[in-house]
Image (cartoon, rainbow, N blue to C red):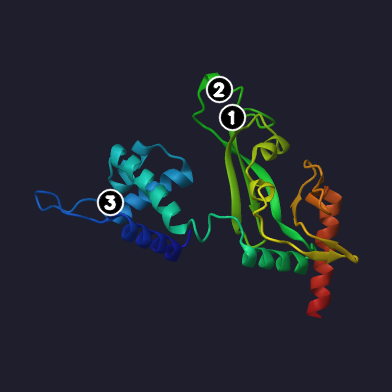
Amino acid sequence: MSRHLFVRIMNVVEAHDDYFVQKRNAANILGLSCFQKVTAAFRMITYGVPADATDEYVRISESTVLESLRRFVAAVVDIFEDEYLRYPNETDTARLLAMGERRGFPGMLGSIDCMHWAWKNCPYEKQGQYKGHVEKPTIILEAVASHNLWIWHAFFGMSGSHNDINVLHRSPLFENLAEGTAPQVNYTVNGHDYTMGYYLADGIYPSWHSGAGGNIIQSLNDEQLAGAAISFRWQFIAASS
């Protein structure tokens, strides 16, 4: 993370929650700074270290680290939810469709995939439930992202014994579509009009037909992905020459 981004997040969190403002105690001694509390929270989130492992680095106790982490996460959600942690609106959808079309995938809203996060301290009695094709216990994160790494959907918490399809069945990704609140999508491919976008996925996902013209999940195998990448590369070279 760049220094500029860290300072920006720290400043807005401090302005949002008075807990992060440095204060003096009854003996007129300055307490912990916002920098110490935010750094401790970031270290726990980034490296997965226990709360008592940050005391030597930032001189902060375990109980204060846990409280700082709880308040930091709540503040980030309160501050940035409306801008980042949300489903695309009409404007966002139009921008995503335009980006997909420029890259050779008209109608694409983003790429979907899952990754396994290792659970180092998984209790022994639960390790069988959280082991799948990965030898270690893991927790699965499903995400949808655009090519510029705007991750607008994240579904975390399924045990590692599941595969990507099981996770998708339980994911809230299509809830707004089922409720009829999804942004309108209109595009044309080879003279055919479509009213529903799709997500690009790897070969484990089946191509799911939406029932409204087109597939909501468009699955590509390795050869198709390579071909699409080569095709886009040639389009880019031709446009640049």
In this rendering, position of residue 121 left or right of residue 55: right
Which residue sits furthest bottom? 241
Q: Residue sitting at 81 percent across and 81 percent down?
A: 241
Q: Is residue 187 above or below residue 239?
A: above
Q: Place residue 88 in its image quadrant.
A: bottom right
Label 3 crowd (10 A; few <14 / some 14-19 / many >=20): some
- Return the residue at label 3: 19
Where is residue 216? Give x, y as percent: 77, 50
- Return the residue at label 1: 137
Badge 3 vs badge 2, beta-carbon distance below 8 Å: no
- Return the residue at label 2: 126
Label 1 crowd (10 A; few <14 / some 14-19 / many >=20): many
Q: Residue sitting at 36 percent across and 57 percent down?
A: 13
Where is residue 63? Give x, y as percent: 29, 38
* Residue at disc 3, secondary structure: helix
Q: Residue sitting at 35 percent across and 62 percent down?
A: 11
Badge 2 vs badge 1, beta-carbon distance below 8 Å: yes
Q: Place residue 140 in its image quadrant.
A: top right
The mark closer to the camera, 1 or 3, is 3
Q: What's under tag 3, amino acid-wise?
A: Tyr
